[in-house]
Amino acid sequence: ELKVEQNPLFLSMQEGKNYTIYCNYSTTSDRLYWYRQDPGKSLESLFVLLSNGAVKQEGRLMASLDTKARLSTLHITAAVHDLSATYFCAVGGLTGGGNKLTFGTGTQLKVEL
Amino acid sequence: EAGVAQSPRYKIIEKRQSVAFWCNPISGHATLYWYQQILGQGPKLLIQFQNNGVVDDSQLPKDRFSAERLKGVDSTLKIQPAKLEDSAVYLCASRPPGVRWNEQFFGPGTRLTVL
């Protein structure tokens, strides 16, 4: 059974600081997704990583994938309050007809003003 | 482009009652998913449809949960009878056709409270 672990589970940081969220998974996959969820809201797609060594950046967020280490990272540069949310990674796996996502437990990020 | 629509947004029922949720995916999206998200956890896949056929329902508690997707568009998820542990947000998602690795687009969810 595929296990997806994120750490830390909770992260409180000051504006302007840098930090990294880690996503480890237990079986081979080369498809990794990052989503953002605001309180009471649904999930918003941030990044889709589809190969070993893939790196994608959007604003202050950068995601990378190391399939050999079964590790993805989400790096936050110079955090701002608007980044406060819960971040989920999800690993893609094949089902009969498409892509099945197994989500991590989430990292709750709070950026202090 | 309209997003994934779900209703109702909130539902409160007593245990052993029945409840149904509705989902309308993004137009043209053949693949539809239902997830259960318990407070403080990541979403867990319950069932996946491709058009109106079930692709994966391995994690669906079939003794009480059922889902259908008639005509390959809208879908309903039903719980009968509900248990306390079914309290969660039920998320519907859909995926564009073509590349299987495309990301899924999520609806706003239905928050279910079972008393």
Image (cartoon, helix red, strand yellow):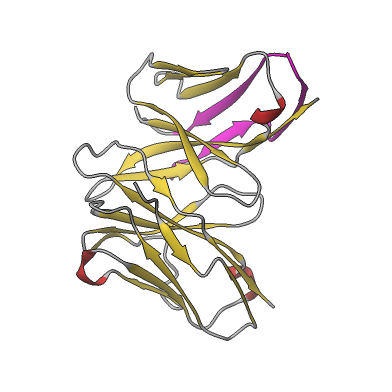
Q: Position of residue A19 (x, y in %)?
A: 67, 17
Q: Is residue B114 left or right of residue B62?
A: right
Q: Residue furthest front?
A: B1
Does the segment drawn in magenta span residue A18? yes
Image point (29%, 36%), residue name: B101
Image point (37%, 51%), residue name: B2
Please give the range of residues in magenta. Answer: A1-26
Q: Quadrant of the N terminus of chain A?
A: top left
Q: Position of residue B107 (x, y in %)?
A: 45, 54
Nearest the viewer among A67 and B24 is B24
Q: Is residue A86 left or right of residue A46?
A: right
Q: Position of residue B5 (x, y in %)?
A: 42, 59
**Residue B110 falls in image quadrant:** bottom right
Image point (51%, 44%), residue name: A43
Q: Is residue A88 above or below residue B22?
A: above
Nearest the viewer among B59 and A34 is A34
Q: Position of residue B17 (x, y in %)?
A: 57, 86
Image point (22%, 36%), residue name: B99
**Residue A7 falls in image quadrant:** top right
Q: Is residue A30 above or below residue A77?
A: below
Q: Quadrant of the C terminus of chain A?
A: top right
How many numbered marks have been drawn onto this rendered protein structure? 0
Does the segment drawn in magenta span residue B81? no
Main secondary structure type of the part rendered in magenta: strand
Nearest the viewer among A28 and B22 is B22
